[in-house]
Each structure stands twice: as structure tokens, then as C-alpha cells.
Amino acid sequence: MKRIVSIVIILAAAVASAADVLYVQSLKAKVMASPGFKSEVKAAVERGTELAVMGKEGDWFHVTTPSGNEGWVNRLTVSENPPLGTVKPVEKNTAAVEDQSRRRASAMTSAAAARGLAEKDRKRLSQLGLADYDSLKALEGFSGSISGDDVEKFVNTGE
Amino acid sequence: MNRLKKIGVILAGLLLIAATIDAGSARGRAHDTKQWITEDDVQAEIEVGREVAARIIGTYTLYKNDELTRYVNLVGKSLARSANRPELMFTFGVLDTPEINAFAAPGGYVFITKGAIDVMANEAELAGVLGHEIIHITQRHIVRELDIKATSKEASAGVGRLLGGSTDVVKVAFTKAVDQAVNILLERGYQKGDEFEADTLGTVLSASMNYDPHALAVYLDHIAKAKEAETATLKKLHPGFDERLQRIGNTITRDGLEGGKYADWKIRFEKYAKRKG
């Protein structure tokens, strides 16, 4: 009897705790004293920080940080899954392609297959002027050459 | 009696678990962050988004100006790092058309027209528009609507059909998702609620980088006064300005964005955006 009660309580607690955690996704997130940016900033938490959720009001979550700070974060900065590493397009993701044979059937294999299959269509679309893959590739290269340090410098020095 | 007690406890326990699950999922729905995604889901999103981006460039052509493109990328990337999709490599491009508009393709591809930049007065307005587009991506508006993900329990669900299917099925599902996304961006427009969310969260995003939160509203005012030929598509694809302005205003008040120390970076904007050639 006691065993059944214990199992029920453990299961309920596990489900409850799974739903009550958020992770910081933005570079930094401000933890405010009340739901709004006008209130006092109680803490700034880094990307990946796990926050215990106690409630919600509008776009704001009432949370506790690992160091025990209690406050409010905007939903813009958090989500329920831990932050993923940078995901690149398949053709740029050499390591992932090499690893492909060992992976389960995935979007990567599917998308790669789709790309291979779509080569004729791509050529046709390009010839008709309906798509421009070369310009896209050049833009990706140009944009990708702008580093995190460049962005940091732009934000901090205005250059 | 003992057996009845046991059954009662088990039933009560099951009810407790069911209630907990329901409360949890209700919180999840309220969160609007319930978007547990895997690396494979993101990969699928990017591949569809790249095709959509190529179609957008094919439709409009890129504006060839490295200084302006770099500047737009710096403003956009500085905003994107404050949002909740760190796994995406955001790419920003300028489209060579006098038409006033901006587009966001899944996976992190954002385009703004030269016509839109030309009606702007400062960087805060640019940040307002880029913030709006970034939110379409971070909130996965098209991805959710078209159910673009790596795996799906529903065999018929969007790109989920890519998995385990024949090569023809892969091709059909992939092409269909791309066509539908292009249709949303160029013909039908986002769902109204998604546009409002992009306005309000985009305003919060740009304000979080110390840009004037009123700038998006000012930009909408510029559009209202622009030539009909340059704004016809944008007006067709978006909700009415009055409703958008009201919701942006409500967000500024509700989230305490009024009265902060904001900058418009007008001089820096003019250096890059108003230069000819």
C-alpha cells in the first residue's frame, strides 16, 4: 500500500518538475524585480542557465535562478529546451555529413536527399529566374564572415 | 475492503498524475515556449528556409552593396543574439527594389528591401523592422504552421513525411513545404496573430538593445504616407496599421518600455544607408 502511494507521489512530482523549468537562450537575460523593464534588475543570467518557474503573468515568467535570486524574465529570452549548439546547413556541416551513416533516419539525411533530388529542379528554377542559389551562397558566406567579436564591437563601440 | 482501498488510492493517484500533466501542459500552452526542438528539426527548418531564401532572391535580386549589407547584418545579428534561437546562424540581405517590405524565411534568413531602408530615418527604425522579422523566425511561425520537423507521429504531417519515405515522397514533401512557405511570404501573408506577436515581441527585442521602442510605429507611419505602388504588397500581407499601432503601444506601456534611455543611431544609419551606390 505504502509502496503504491510512494510511486504515485514520485510520478506526479516527476511530471510536475519536468514542466517547470526554463533555459536562458539569449546571450544574457535580465531578471527583473517585477514583470516589466522599468523595475529593478535583480540579476543577469547567462545563456544556458536553468530557471525554476513559479508562475506567469503576460509575457513574463516568475523564476528562481540557481543562485537563489527570485524575479521575472521575459519570454523572449527563454525556452523549455536547453540551448542547442549552432546548426549549419547540411553542405557546410562536414562533421555531421561524415557522421550521417551512424545516425538514425533524420531531417539531415532527408534534406540532403531532397537537395540531391532537387538539383534538376534547382537548375530549372535558376534558368527561369525564379531562384538564385549562387547569390544566396555568396550572401551566406559574406554574413557568416561577420564574427561574434565583430558584433560585440559594433554594439560596444558603435563601429 | 482492503482491495477497495487499494483501488481507491490507485485511482486517486492516477487522477493526481492526470491533473499534474494537464496543469503542466496548460502552463506549456501559456508559455508559448513549448517548442521542444531537436537538432534534426532545426536542420529541416534550415534546409526549407534556404530554398525559400533562394526563391526570394530570385524574385527580387540582391542589392549589391557590401557596406550596407554588412551594416544590416551587424544590426540584425546584435538583435538576434538577444532572442531565444542561439542555434541559428542569422543571415541578413538587402533586396534591390523600391517596394517597401521585409521577409523572414525559416532557419534565420531575413531580407529587407532597399525601398524600406530608404523611407527610414534612423537605425532604431531598421532595428524595429529587423526585430519584427527575427521574431517570425524565433517563434517559428511558418515552421509551426507547416509542421516542418524531422520526425512526426502523423505520417501525413508536412516535412515529417520526409522520414522513412521513398525518394519521391521526400522530394514531394520538401517541395510542397517550400512552395507553401513562399506562398505565405509573397502571396497570403502570415496569420494575423503571428504578425501581432512579431510586432510586440519585436518591439521588446529592439528595446532590449536600447533602440527606441516607438521606432517601429514611426516606420509604419512612414509607410502609411508612402506611394501606393511601393506599399501595395506589404499592405496586402499585413493587418491594418491602426490595430498594429494599438498593440505596439499596449506593449510599450505594459512592459514598462516607456521613458528608458534609448538611442536612434541616426548618424551611423545615414553613414551606411543614405550613401548612394
Image (tube, coloured by chain):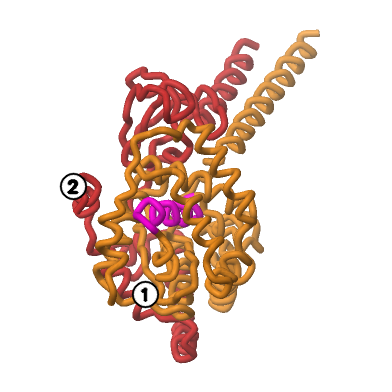
Chain colours: A red, B orange
Relative to B208, say whether B131 is above or below: below
Name the quadrant containing residue A1: top right
Give residue B202's position: percent from left, percent from top: 47, 48
Q: Nearer the viewer, residue B243 or B19?
A: B243
Amino acid type of disc 1? Leu
Magenta stretch containing residue A67, yes or no? Answer: no
From the viewer's perspective, is B14 left or right of B78? right
Q: Which residue is mark 1?
A: A136
Q: Return the chain for callout 1.
A: A
Q: Return the chain for callout 2.
A: A
Q: Nearer the viewer, residue A140 or B249?
A: B249
**Residue at 59%, 23% in the rendered image:** A12
* CA distance separating discs 2 and 1: 30 Å
Residue B173 visible in rendering: no
**Residue at 42%, 30% in the rendered image:** A37
**The residue stretch that appears in magenta:** B121-138
Q: Which residue is mark 2?
A: A157
Q: In the structure shown, which secondary structural element does the residue marked by tag 1 occupy?
A: helix
Pointer 2 with pointer 1, Cβ within 8 A: no
Name the quadrant containing residue B8: top right
Please give the label number shown on residue B161: none
Amino acid type of disc 2? Thr
Location of the C terminus of chain A by quadrant is bottom left
Relative to B143, say whether B206 is above or below: above
